[in-house]
Amino acid sequence: MTSRTRALLATGVWGLTVIPALVALPLSLRDRLPEPLATHWSGATPDGNMSFTRNMLFSVGMAAVIMAVMAGIAVHGKAFERRLSRGYWWGILFGSAVFVIGMEWSILRANLDVPVWTQATGFGWDVLVVLGASAAVGVLAGFLLRGEPDQAAPEGEAPPRLRLRSGQRSVWVSRVSNPWLVALTAGSALLTAAVGVLTLMGLTSGAGWSLLGVSVVLLAVGLLTSSITARITEDGLAIGFGPFGWPVRRIRLSKIDSAWSEQRFPSQVGGWGIRGVPGAAAIMLRGGDCLVLRYRSGGQLLISIDDAERGAALLNALIEERAGA
Amino acid sequence: MLLTLDLNDPRPLHEQVAGAIRRAIGEGSYQAGDRLPPAKDLADALGINANTVLRALRDLRDEGLLEFRRGRGVSVAGVPTGRALIVQRARDLLEEAKKYGYSRDDLIEVLKELS
């Protein structure tokens, strides 16, 4: 069964479970509910109502829309090509089931055994519980059903490798910086200084402070992402951000599956800087030579850096040596 | 820059570091004019004192392989010639031979046998 058929089947099962539940739940409590029902709250007091039937149709309609969207994404099929989007799809499917049933349940619970809708009880922590539960179920389902890691090593792939001899210690050190980003950082440093002085002297109006805030943020981001250093030792890879090599992101050798070098460009990863989501991240300062790591967990990290092929070769050799030891 | 040190090498550490940098440049990691990583980065990665790396860099500058420029750090002045690389490899070979109890003269004999 392909992942698309399985997803469509799951969407069908979802509809056959969630929609009957949304009909059966209010029907089973009908004689204990007021007519109309309180369906909207501001703070702890109800301020909106719907008739029993409209409320039921509304929740069923919401479920039908979710089902149609999920089925549409499944038919399109693109979402199942990558592990991250597969995880999202399954997470949203299961999480939304808990969400729609949970919201219906909390509306009914608030209206249970009250004579008129204005006396419905508050609607506070129920919502938090429902949101928390649907998020938890969604994350769990996404994690369990995300499937195989992306890019299983292609047949006959030969990542660059280096021969290490016992009694030798090899390290790799490299750095990269982008002159444009450095210039931007220097510019925002000047701007920060100028606006800072003017603001402290009281020469600017209210806008001065917000301009100062923006230029400080630009300066901080620029300092962190205009240059990076990378080094590979027996401990793994350490990436230092900014001219002082701090903060440092360390990736232990045991987490890395393999490494290789590739020519990649900012247009392929969504621009300059630190990009992407956990599982498919990129630290992109300039187009060209990039070091790519495949994590054991299936994710990928791309770092634009000079001399990437030697770094990848050393990483692969160290991983192999560690596996042999 | 890929640097390899031999942990059993009896030579002073700064000489070994200089040898490793010479090899890295000779293997084509760096072209003339390229900047080397800062000495501090190299020292951190190798787990040695930054002064040891600086001493190695100064030795290589005296050899004419590197040049120091104020504000621009250390850059490669010229790619080592074939002879410089052969000398480096011969030095390594001599060290290796000594480990197995062969003297310099023994090694010369081995080389003569090769031709």
Image (cartoon, rainbow, N blue to C red):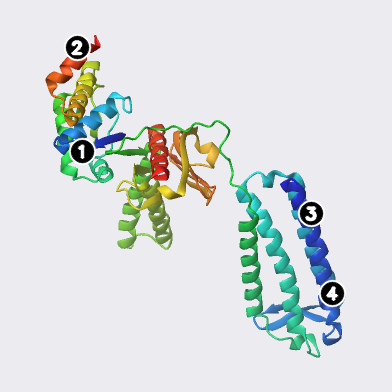
Rounded to the nearest whole Å, what is the CA distance between mark 4 and mark 3?
23 Å
| Label 2 vs label 3, nearer the camera | 2
Q: Foreground: B58 or A83?
A: A83
For label 1, the residue is: B8
> From the viewer's perspective, is the residue at label 4 or at label 3 nearer?
3
- Which quadrant is home to the C terminus of chain A? top left
- How many marks the image carries: the answer is 4
**x and y percent of residue A30 in the render?**
85, 82
- Write down the residue under mark 3: A9
Measuring 41% from the left and 55% from the top, which residue is drawn there?
A217
Q: Residue at x 79, y 66 (%)?
A: A18
In the image, residue A242 lies at what x, y percent? 34, 47
Q: Please indicate whether residue A166 sits to the left or right of residue A322 in the image.
A: left
Circle number at residue B112: 2
Spatial separation of the CA atoms under disc 2 and disc 3:
77 Å
In primary-sequence order, the first of circles 4 and 3 is 3
Circle 1 crowding by C-alpha within 10 Å: few under 14, some 14–19, many from 20: few
Q: CA distance from mark 1 to mark 2?
A: 28 Å
Q: Chain of mark 1?
A: B
Q: In the image, what residue type sits under mark 3?
A: Leu
1 and 4 marks in contact (CB < 8 Å): no
Position above or below: A3 against B68:
below
Label 2 SS: helix
Q: Chain of mark 3?
A: A
Label 3's element?
helix
Residue A102 placement: quadrant: bottom right
What SS does tag 1 mark? Answer: loop
